Amino acid sequence: MHEEREQERDRARDDDGRAARLELKHLRCLIAIVDSGSFTDAAIELGTSQAAVSRTLLSLERVLGVRLLHRTSRAITPTTAGVQVIQRARHLLADADDLVREATTGHTRLRIGHAWGSLGRHTAEFQRRWRERYPDVELLLVRHNSPTAGLAEGACDLAVVRTAAVDPSRYGHATVGHERRYVAMASDDPWARRRSVPLAEIRARTLAVDRRTGTTTVGLWPREARPAVEYTADVDDWLDAIAAGRCVGVTPHATVTQYRREGVVYRPVRDAAPVPVQTLWNQHDPHPRTHAAIALLTELYGPTATP
């Protein structure tokens, strides 16, 4: 038993006697051998010697405690364990490369998060003008189904939100514009023949509400005259409930432009207050182009624009 433990410890140590640990260089070496088909070609690809490639593979096998490759004079083939390790290694290396790319491109990429509606009717024009003015900063629009549109989760650098559920005191914030409210309904709904619908009439219907990222709450109506509610999980769920005729929904103009679906029509709400469009960002670590994005959005929405 004592001898077996000694052998296990020996297998778990590198050539220099230190306790072995898994490193990315081990995985890169393994993938280079498999993809190139030989230790010689792997050494050329990695810019090292064939002996170093052999030692690195042996070190990896010791760390994992399994043999990964069958080596003959004609071919190199993975073992059963090797097939699994190779597949996982490719994913790990891809993730590591993404991490490095994110860290090194940091300020050359601006991620704008949104839960619904993106930048509304200004989405395409914003992207065009951004590319013209800031060609050195890649723009990415990221849909994230959270109240902060991905900002709290680290999925974006700047968030565009239209929900009152976010506490702007936690973030830097600015209002860039306002959007008119619309009522969404099934295309065969009697209201579809109207040009607009008053807010008071909507209280008689069942209202589809996304309580997580939606912009509408029953607070739009007096406490004694609020509509029945069906809660939905996201914008697709919301649209499904409306298309089926179970509910109507109240939403800003951005939804009208970004989510046109067969079986759903939109009509303006005649007398409802517009929805403020806000931007949120991390106060202590803002992206250098944060205020450039806010300025461009404000320019597009205009000082009093309410589509």
Image (cartoon, rainbow, N blue to C red):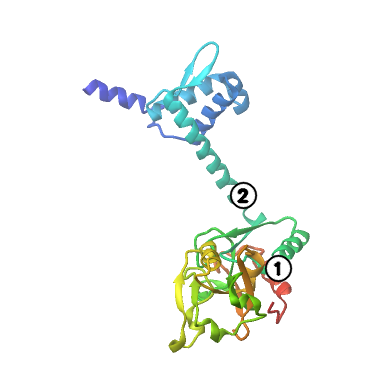
Q: Three-letter amino acid code at disc 1?
A: His
Looking at the image, residue 300 sits to the left or right of residue 19; the answer is: right
- Between 251 and 103, which is closer to the camera in this rendering? 251
Hey, which residue is sitting farthest top in the picture?
73
Which residue is painted at 54% across and 73% down in the image?
Answer: 249
Q: Which mark is residue 104?
A: 2
Which residue is painted at 59% across and 50% down in the image?
Answer: 102
Looking at the image, residue 150 sits to the left or right of residue 118; the answer is: left
Q: Is residue 177 visible?
A: no
Look at mark 1 in the image and give the residue it sits on.
122
Q: Position of residue 114 (x, y in %)?
A: 58, 64
Which residue is painted at 73% across and 55% down in the image?
Answer: 136
Quadrant for residue 280, please give it: bottom right
The answer to the question of whether label 1 and label 2 lie on touching residues, with beta carbons closer than 8 A, is: no
The kind of secondary structure element at disc 2 is: helix
Q: Is residue 130 visible?
A: yes
Which quadrant of the rendered structure holds the C terminus?
bottom right
The kind of secondary structure element at disc 1 is: helix
Q: Position of residue 189 (x, y in %)?
A: 58, 73
Q: CA distance from mark 1 to mark 2?
A: 30 Å
Which quadrant of the rendered structure holds the N terminus?
top left
